[in-house]
Amino acid sequence: MSASIRQLEDLLARELGRVVIGAHTSVRALTVALVARGHVLVQGVPGLGKTLLAKALACALGGEFKRIQGTADLMPSDIIGVHVFDEAQRAFVFRPGPLFADVVLVDEINRAGPKTQSALLEAMEERQVSVERAAWQLPADFLVIATQNPRDFEGTYPLPESQLDRFMLRIDMDYPAREAEADILARYGGVLAAGQEALGQITVLGRALIGEARAEVERIHVAGALVSYVLDLAHASREHARLTLGLSTRGALALLKAGRIAAGLRGGDFVTPDDIKEVAVSVMAHRLVLTPEAALEGVTDLDVVHGLLSATPVPR
């Protein structure tokens, strides 16, 4: 059981490891998002390899890849596209923007203004964009990989809650361990662009394997008690004294889907509470909005998620 999904994780770890040292810490979350067709938000201070990780994943997935650099003057039309007058046709023709790709990397998404950030909402949820009263379909496996700096950095805008909720997972990148950082300096300390050369060595994952992994996940059993456990976590977050916004229904669905995939990755035929706990932080934390008092006291979204997992009774 679950041979394909574990093979997918092993291949993803191998290919990302060609470029990103220490990528094994993020591979599990990326595998979950890939199988579930979920979008990924990568958060961390500048210079930790967030963009390199996103580019490596895009290379491994294949298909058409486009990159959008978040800046304060970026406009919605810059990413969606515009209508231009075609002299040959004597009519206005739609020219698609970089959003029309299989894998879209939005680098430093929170440096783009709120108007541009909101332009991604329809694309991320419905895999289509509406322009001039017409709907334009995006690829079936359309995937957004976005990187962001901590919100207290200069020149950043907080992402709207509605957009954060559309990211299935958030990966928090921290400074690497000393040994890993020594390997990074040894590999990339030269004057040549070793990172770009390594990206060219990545082998594209087979689409058939991804489809098989998704089919395996559909066969994993979810007991009614586990559904109740997910609902208990969601309702506890909505009533939490330190939160102004708890887990949405979309977030509860993402948590359940991620739990099923985690069960498949350990070779299980059914979901356990430990599977839900394993993915809860990456699925829930970015969706929770702290009260101003909690933020002033130094409470983090990670603290709240760990508290919810500790306080919510686990089904037996």
Image (cartoon, grey):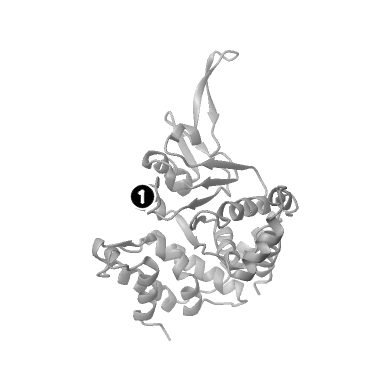
Image quarter of the C terminus: bottom left
Amino acid found under the numbered disc labelled 1: Pro
Relative placement, left or right, of 40 versus 119 is right
Observer-nearest residue: 60 or 316? 60
Image quarter of the N terminus: bottom right
Q: Residue furthest bottom?
A: 316
Relative placement, left or right, of 41 versus 217 is left
Few, some or many residues within 10 Å of mark 1 (<14, 14–19, 20+): few
Observer-nearest residue: 212 or 5? 5
Indicate the quadrant where residue 31 lies. bottom right
Pinpoint residue 194: horizontal percent, then vertical percent: 72, 51
**Visible residue check, residue 124:** yes
In the depicted structure, whether residue 219 falls above or below residue 45: below
In the depicted structure, whether residue 295 falls above or below residue 85: below
Label 1 sits on a secondary structure element that is: loop
Relative placement, left or right, of 198 versus 126 is right
Pinpoint residue 89: horizontal percent, then vertical percent: 58, 15
